Amino acid sequence: MSRHYCPTCCYPMNACLCSHLQQIKPQTQLLVLQHPSEVEHKKNSVRVLSLVIPDTQVYVGESEADFAALRAQLSRCQRPIYLVYPSEQSASVESQSICVDCVLLLIDGTWRKAFKILQLNPWLAQFPAVHLAQGYASRYKIRKSSRSDSLSTLEASAYMLKALDDGLDVSPLLAAFDAMVAMRLQAMPAEVRLRYD
């Protein structure tokens, strides 16, 4: 029997997020480089991010050629562009004086896949890299990570936007994310759900 999907949020009807969605329009532009393996993932936080911030642009790929359209767009961009990626070269967004009317590039994938995208796209090094300061705890109970500082792409986006514009209410992002996580947990068999407590 085929599953019925909500035409608005594209989630199965029994996991429809529409009642939990409240759109926001930050001044900051979010551009996501998404690894192909994340696109159909049930726990994909970028889908929720795009529902709450419809101006989010997602480019799927891995190699330089995959991101040709994104590179062309960025070459015409008149706004400051920052790569969100923690490294020895990156600076905390909280320690910078960054204009809210900027572009944030986010890489969506596991740490290993995000690093691979970074390695295959040396052109990303032309943009200053920023990261969040310590102290942000992930609410992403349904995905395990080898790193204690791991945040989903949605969480990283929410905290970055808040750091750039303290007056921006990012609670709609986190509320929709929490609802998605709760529904995924609810759909799990009880014995599986225990692994995520």
Image (tube, rainbow, N blue to C red):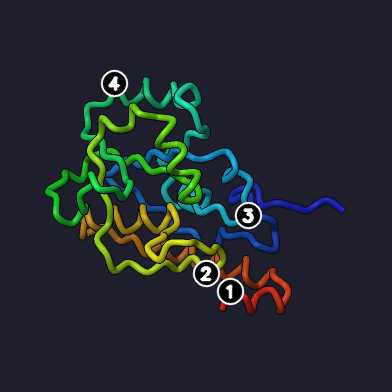
Q: Nearer the viewer, mark 2 or mark 4?
A: 2
- N-terminal of the pair, mark 2 or mark 4, is 4
Task: Give, as a three-letter code, the residue at label 4.
Answer: Arg
Distance CA(mark 2)–CA(mark 4): 39 Å
Task: Give, as a three-letter code, the residue at label 1.
Answer: Tyr
Query: Residue 128's spot in the image, x, y percent?
Result: 22, 38
Determine which residue is flagged by label 2. Answer: 141
Query: Could you say whether the residue bearing mark 2 is in a helix, strand or loop?
Result: loop
Query: Could you say whether the residue bearing mark 4 is in a helix, strand or loop?
Result: helix
> Where residue 196 is drawn, which disc sits there?
1
Q: Nearer the viewer, mark 1 or mark 3?
A: 1
- N-terminal of the pair, mark 1 or mark 2, is 2
Query: Measured along the vertical axis of the image, is residue 111 above or below residue 105?
Result: below
Distance CA(mark 1)–CA(mark 2): 6 Å
Query: Residue 194's spot in the image, x, y percent?
Result: 64, 79
Task: Give, as a three-letter code, the residue at label 2.
Answer: Lys
Mark 2 surroundings within 10 Å by alpha-carbon count, few (fewer than 14), some (14 through 19), many (20 or more): some
Query: Could you say whether the residue bearing mark 1 is in a helix, strand or loop?
Result: helix
> Where residue 76 is drawn, which disc sits there?
4
Residue at left 53%, top 67%?
Answer: 179
Residue at left 33%, top 27%?
Answer: 123
Quadrant of res 74:
top left
